[in-house]
Image (cartoon, helix red, strand yellow):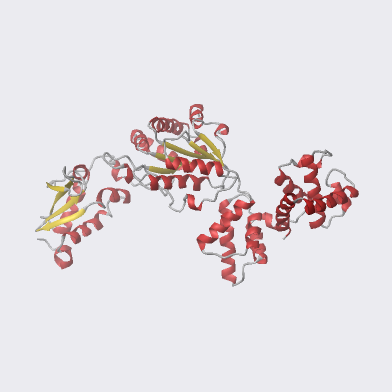
Amino acid sequence: MSNNLYNTSHILNDAEAAWEKCLSIIKDNVNWRTFQTWFDPIKAAALEANVLTLQVPSQFFYEWLEEHYVELLGKTIKRVLGKDGRLEYRILMESGASQRNPISINMPGSTHTRPPKENNYVDMPLKWDDPHNIKTPYAIPGLKRMQIDSQLNANYIFENYVEGDCNRVARSAGIHVAQKPGATSFNPLVVFGGVGWGKTHLVQAIGNEVRRLHPNKAVLYVSAEKFINQFIDHSRNNEINDFIHFYQLIDVLIVDDIHLLIPAVKTQEVFFAIFNHLHQSGKQIILTSDTPPKDLEGMQERLLSRFRWGLNADIQPPDFETRQSILRMKMRHEGLEIPDDVVKYVAYNVQTNVRELEGAIIALFAQSTLNKKEIDIDLAKRVMKNFVKTAARELTIENIQKMVCEYFHVGYDKLLAKTRKREVVQARQITMYFAKKFTKSSLKHIGEHFGGFDHTTVIHSCQTVVNLMDTDAEYKEHLLEIQQKVQLASL
């Protein structure tokens, strides 16, 4: 036997050690996905003289290795065992009597080598992390679908997705889809809403829940940008059929930011073919968009009509209460303790983007740790001043007017009109009351901000509010909720 690492150490005198040495060489010659698919499942079974016996999961597995990796395996085994080294295989076969007692058969390994096929797509790099150089994880014949990497973030689950009025319909539909993927009327499920409102978290939570409840289903999350780049890449290599075939294997396909397909006309055509196949096969399709499907100008009409087949669920910016709940969940997850008044202050000042909301809490805690200061309103004001512009604004009559209008769903223009409608009069009286309480404006100045009412009207409005607070518990509750928001804005 030749001088090599196998003969220099007794550690390599067993099959497992020899195969580990082989694997370390193979890792340097194939991409990580290929390694995980075709080499990681192999076990060393025996080593006698110069023959290493490998245990493989199936007949197909053995044939695929011999067809596509015979040269790599041949060179590797000779490097480890010497020039006379060779491979044999042991294939586990299910016994007819009992699946618990599988039998095995031995198969010889090839003693010859052959050059690899041109365009051997299995050996192509599969770089999901680079949107400009992405290779599709192709549908390898015989590959179990559950072996497809879902590309899901395990942290995105329903348990940490806070429910509120802003997302209740979409979240409920998502849970329903996860329980019965492809078997509900919510197919496709299209979730739309602004940036940072929780669309990606929700659809990935659906995917993770499907994997938990239906482990045999193939789930794949892909951004529309990656999908487009995959299509372009494989168009250049004349591998469109492989590209389409891979996606047709998926049981639950999640495509994020579908609106990005609008300028990619050819990609839309391919996606149409994939969509049709999946839908007709009873597979689940989940999409996200920054606008409702009806507003996706430039998207093929035949695609838009299919998007309307299922459920279009919108997500709105989180309201004040939901923002507080999100912050408290983030605090529990990170093990943070922050005073309640600070939580409310942050929730008030970061009003639209959930990611910014969570980032604000982390920034606050970081400043507290670095500067060795207690987390309080003063620290929060300093941090938020650099975090969002709204934190530094001065409380004005206009600010109060907008807050009250938003609370009662009354148009700002109606608040300024001289109407006697009950809901408008109530909103106007409350706004005048808070304007007097939280600003330094004179009664005359307050009245002028409501279309020219005089100071006596302002006095009457304020007194009416005080009287109703003493006699109407529900009215008082509404007033205190609004007052809390106004107080936060005045800090």
Q: Left or right: where does residue 174 sit relative to residue 324?
A: left
| Residue 200 % position (x, y) | 50, 46
Residue drawn at point x = 71 percent, y = 52 percent: 477
Residue 9 shows in this picture: no
The outermost residue toward the top is 302
The outermost residue toward the front is 471
* Quarter of the figure that contains the N terminus: bottom left
Q: Residue 114 sits in which quadrant?
A: top left
Residue 361 shows in this picture: yes
* Quarter of the figure that contains the C terminus: bottom right
Q: Residue 233 sits in which quadrant?
A: top left
Q: Left or right: where does residue 66 sit relative to residue 201?
A: left
Of residues 367 and 67, the one nearer the viewer is: 367
Q: Residue 379 sits in which quadrant?
A: bottom right
Count of numbered labels shown in the rendering? 0
Of residues 31 and 35, the one nearer the viewer is: 35
The outermost residue toward the bottom is 372
Of residues 335 and 265, the one nearer the viewer is: 335
| Residue 311 % position (x, y) | 51, 35
| Residue 269 % position (x, y) | 44, 30
Of residues 132 and 259, the one nearer the viewer is: 259
Q: Left or right: where does residue 237 sit relative to residue 487?
A: left
| Residue 404 % position (x, y) | 74, 48
Residue drawn at point x = 77 percent, y = 45 percent: 427
